[in-house]
Amino acid sequence: MRRPVIAGNWKMFKTVEESEAFIDALAPLVEDSTHCDIVVAPPFTALSAVVKRIQGTRILASAQNCHWEKEGAFTGEVSCEMIAETGARYVIIGHSERRQYFGETNDTVNRKIGAALRVDLTPLVCIGESLSEREQGQTERVLETQLREGLAALTDLQFSHIIIAYEPVWAIGTGRTATPQIAAEAHRFIRGTLATFFSASLASETRILYGGSVKPDNIKGLMAQPEIDGALVGGASLKADSFASLVNF
Ligand code: PEP
């Protein structure tokens, strides 16, 4: 049985004060939500404050990115050791915005996964095709390459700690969500591919989230698909009541 995960990626939104106010508003709304893992990913500046504020709640915290080295002359970067020290439990790796604007590659995704696992952070690994790749019939090839290169050389044990997020780039922040059928089809392909890299039983236990314009009015249809194990949400995770309705889908 795969336990659902509903994760909110705040991107470059929310000051410390706004983040704390969000947690105070969200916590009572998800107090009884025992059916899924609830994760919020604030910007680095608010991560420690959020971790403090979620004590005693069912909410867990994630970073949005990391560096693969433990420390060093890497101006502006944050290591997994530093993230783990805050008490955050997850880290988003390979988000399409990192791939598109900040030079993230499958190779850096692979290194970051290794770094996260080194300190017991759960990597939330994002993959997904662009609109032109989908239109050219390249979706499966792109997903297979992202998985093969991003997860290269991981052992079964290492892989067992990873969560995958399928986020078609054309659906992120566009209001154009994939239909539950399109998402489920991609998830089936991803799970089948994982079964060729790792054991079939591990692949069947892997949680695969969908991301891309998930909103309170479309989450039910997505979550009704047995292949979809949760959601990674951007825009609709920024307001406590909207995120709570996603959690309580
Ligand atoms: C995301 O940033 O991972 C995302 C899916 O954004 P949105 O929900 O706004 O499309």
Image: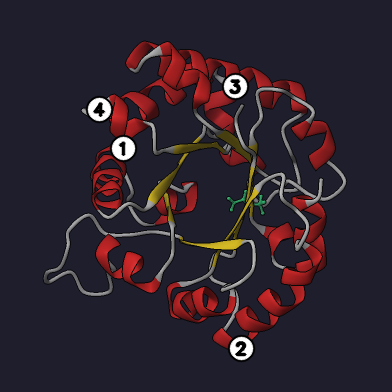
Residue farthest bottom in this picture: 17
Sequence-wise, the earlier of marks 1 and 2 is: 2
Q: Which residue is mark 2?
A: 17
**Kind of residue at disc 2:** Glu
Q: Is residue 170 left or right of 97 when viewed as pictured?
A: right
Q: Are marks 4 and 1 in contact (CB under 8 Å)?
A: no
Sequence-wise, the earlier of marks 3 and 2 is: 2
Q: Are marks 4 and 2 in contact (CB under 8 Å)?
A: no
- Give the SS element for disc 2: helix
**Kind of residue at disc 1:** Asn
**Label 4, residues with CA under 10 Å away: few <14, some 14-19, many ≥20:** few
Give how far apart the Cα atoms at labels 3 and 4 are.
24 Å
Q: Which residue is mark 3?
A: 186
Q: Which residue is mark 4?
A: 155
Quick check: 217 above or below 60?
above
Q: Are marks 3 and 4 in contact (CB under 8 Å)?
A: no
Q: Is residue 188 left or right of 197 when viewed as pictured?
A: right
Sequence-wise, the earlier of marks 4 and 2 is: 2
- Residue 220 location (% of width, % of height): 83, 37
What residue is at 77 percent from the left and 51 percent from the top?
246
**Kind of residue at disc 4:** Thr
Q: Are marks 1 and 2 in contact (CB under 8 Å)?
A: no
Residue farthest right in this picture: 217
What residue is at 53 percent from the left and 70 percent from the top?
12
